[in-house]
Image: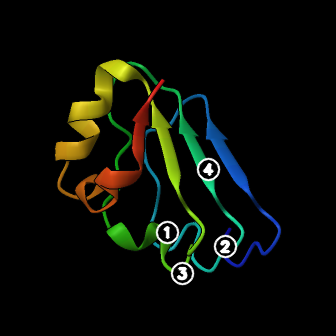
Amino acid sequence: MGNCSSLTTASFPVCSYIGSYAFVHCRSLTTIYLNQTSSVCSLPYSNAFSNCFKLTSIYVPSSLVTAYKNHSQWRYYSNKIIGI
């Protein structure tokens, strides 16, 4: 999916895994919605969003904000994680 120059938002009603380089070079990507309420979406490598310079917000269920911010790979994006 990488190199999506016009992608601005990605929404996942259910997410169990986001792979390496999934959104690499998606330079217009600003917002991600991870709506699954039962568990943290696995992000094995923090390079999934490499060169997504405009990424400012990762929305997750309020009940999982702490889990996302403390997760070993999501921690890199902790300042962008927002509860909804």
Q: How many marks?
A: 4
Task: Tell me the kind of residue under disc 4.
Answer: Thr
Cα separation, mark 4 vs mark 1, equals 11 Å
Cα separation, mark 2 vs mark 1, equals 8 Å
Dot placed on the residue nearer the N-terminal end, 4 or 1: 4
Residue drawn 43% across the image and 48% down it: 17
Q: What element carries label 2?
A: loop
- For disc 1, the marked residue is 49
Label disc, if present, on residue 51 of the rendered structure: 3
Cα separation, mark 4 vs mark 3, equals 14 Å
- For disc 4, the marked residue is 31
Q: Are the residues flagged by discs 2 and 3 in contact, CB closer than 8 Å?
A: yes
Colouring of the image = rainbow
Task: Tell me the kind of residue under disc 1.
Answer: Phe
49 shown above or below 79: below
Q: Are the residues flagged by discs 2 and 1 in contact, CB closer than 8 Å?
A: yes
Task: Tell me the kind of residue under disc 3.
Answer: Asn
Q: Is mark 4 on a helix, strand or loop?
A: strand
Dot placed on the residue nearer the N-terminal end, 2 or 4: 2
Task: Tell me the kind of residue under disc 2.
Answer: Cys
